[in-house]
Amino acid sequence: MPRGVREGCGPQTTFAILKALEKSDALLLHLDEPDKCRADYQSAWSRAVANDVWDVLDEILPVADYLKTNGGPVTLENTEALNAKVHSSLFPAGSGTWQAVFNEGALPNAGFFVQNSVPPDDVTLAARVRAAKFIPGELLARFASALLFLQYPNRAEEKWKVLDSSAITALAQRFGHIIDVETLDLHGVGMRKIESLATQLLFTLRRQQRAGNEKGHLAL
């Protein structure tokens, strides 16, 4: 929630960040899909949200206001101590999914000598992200210059790790369903595929309950 929101809408996000930081030795702040900051700023709401994001990345947080609102003593010592923690122990990290950037290098070659496409390396991907201006330059400059790219899980071991950590494996085993990870393709959809799989399991469970709980094979 941006600063200045009317009372009753919820706590300000900047205050929530300071509260979490105050209780921790260090704080990793995840900014999901910062590319959405390139949306128009015609409304007061969008401008307020953008200003808060910029201020957090610039390590400018309303420390004095936070201390005052939370009933703490607003002294020079307390203010400087929390500000110092903002500068030394707050680590913002942004993430996003730009499927078009990955797909550009995954298209099959045309012509008589067709070869398997080679996924672009990180340097190429970073150049494409910057060239496409998915994130405003002034916002991207506030992050580390080296962009990190995480590929979709491809090997069976990687897929099982995703299924295990999201409780899909346990849910399937509980009701006797078999998950074939060889047909599980997360490329381009990511967690949406996991959500879809969970929905299929719950629907199948419901049908099993109605049909006498027969065991079956779940196709992905």
Image (tube, rainbow, N blue to C red):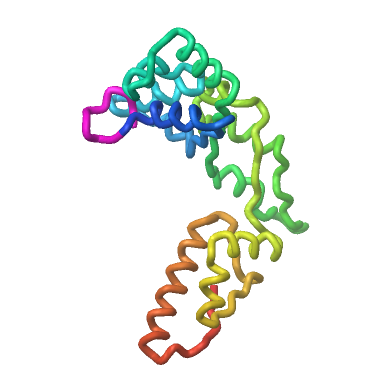
Q: Is residue 12 above or below residue 220?
A: above
Q: Is residue 147 above or below residue 68?
A: below
Q: Is residue 192 above or below residue 60?
A: below
Q: Quarter holding the C terminus? A: bottom right
Q: Is residue 213 left or right of residue 69?
A: right
Q: Residue at x 51, y 62 (%)?
A: 194
Q: Residue at x 53, y 41 (%)?
A: 96
Can the viewer see residue 181 in this picture? yes
Residue placed most toward the observer, 62 or 135: 62
Image coords of residue 80 (percent x, y): 50, 11
Type of secondary structure dominating the magenta stretch: loop
Residue 185 location, quadrant: bottom right
Residue placed most toward the observer, 157 or 166: 166
Image coords of residue 43 (percent x, y): 27, 26
Can the viewer see residue 43 in this picture? no
Q: Is residue 7 magenta?
A: yes
In this view, the residue farthest toward the top is 76
Q: How many marks?
A: 0
In this view, the residue farthest toward the left is 7
Residue 204 location, quadrant: bottom left
Q: Where are the magenta residues, as a range?
A: 1-10
Q: Quarter holding the N terminus? A: top left
Image coords of residue 22 (percent x, y): 49, 27
Residue 122 location, quadrant: top right
Q: Is residue 95 magenta?
A: no
Residue placed most toward the observer, 106 or 69: 69
Q: Residue at x 48, y 39 (%)?
A: 32
Image coords of residue 69 (percent x, y): 32, 22
